[in-house]
Amino acid sequence: MNTKSSVLKKTVYVLIPLALVAAMVIRLKSNKEITLQKVYQYDIEKPIPVLADTIQIENLDADLFFSGTFEPNKETKISAEVQGKINDVLVDIGSNVTQGQALIQLDNSLLKFQLQTTELQIEGLEADVNRYSVLTKADAIQGVQLEKAELALKSAKVQRATLLEQINKTLIKAPFKGIVTSKLTEAGAFAAPGVPLLQITDISNLKFTANVSENELKLFVVNQSYQVTTDAYSEIVLNGVTTMIGSKANAGSSFPIQFTVSNTPDMKIKSGMFGKVNLKTITSEKGIVISSSTITGPANQPQVYLIKNGKAMVQNITILSRTQNKAIVSGGLKAGDVMITNGFINLFNGANVTVK
């Protein structure tokens, strides 16, 4: 009896784990089936909606646009040439100032007291020189006394000129016409040489800088005029004269081209605004021009997608040159080809497509 009971127990111990494993396998299989039902199964046969355009031969004459930024012609931070307490700041941010206009007044009361003392010394020394001159002519005194008085008078006059210059420097003036674009101090603060107090920006004339590739450098000539527009005011066309063609590439392997531009009378163009320089190319050649956004494939083998018999087919192309967001194609395409221009998500060679 004990033997049968022991065997039964062992059988139960074996069957229970097996039942648990079986239940777990069934549950996992059920979960997998449910998950597969929820997961999106991409149908490679389903047509992919795309946008397309028919390739045409066109004139290669084009307006090339190069983006850039406007910068002030002149900009400087104003600091004092002498140290002293600031009595008054006569301008604020946004103030239009003219060349030589008073901006900041420093305390000069002590210098004025010193000037008064020097003026009194000069007055006394002038009297001594006049008196000694009369006495010297009459041989009443030695000439050396007159010489000493004259030297003392010259020294006092130099001292007066120095004080006048120091007093003049306590009134800080605008070095050129412009706008106050930064105010870094207030009345009661202490000014010292080299410590910025105000920033003056001149935007009556602007510098416009665009970056171009090495192949596009030859399109620009120094002192030649070009049309420049702003993104904010596209209706305003400015005349930009090339003042600098970069001799060294920047981190992006492009070269800076700088133009001088006169602002509008109401100073609409601000420093930091974006704009474009318009360069019109003139040629009698014809060719195929496509958008750079349609080009796929590696850099050494550019490709596009053509639609043939309702399918997207990869086509290798040869690019003659690139200008901004356009590419001139010299091989691989012909007039009449239908090229996909948008809808590249999930697109692959041989995919069924439908044109929207």
Image: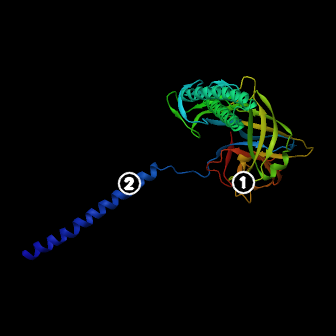
Secondary structure state at the residue bearing disc 2? helix
| Residue bearing the label numbered 1 | 253
Instruction: Tell me if label 1 and label 2 are in contact, CB under 8 Å.
Output: no
Which is nearer the eye, 329 or 19?
Answer: 329
Q: Which residue is mark 2?
A: 31
Rendered view: 67 above or below 15: above
Amino acid carrying label 1: it is Ser
Which mark lies nearer to you, 1 or 2? 1
Q: Which mark is residue 245?
A: none
Residue 68, x across and y down, in percent: 72, 40
Give the position of the C terminus as an image quadrant.
Answer: top right
Q: Is residue 342 left or right of residue 17?
A: right
Q: Nearer the viewer, residue 289 or 254?
A: 254
Query: Which percent across, then down, holds residue 74?
Result: 71, 36
- Examine the rendered structure and indicate whether residue 335 appears above or below residue 5: above
Colour mapping: rainbow
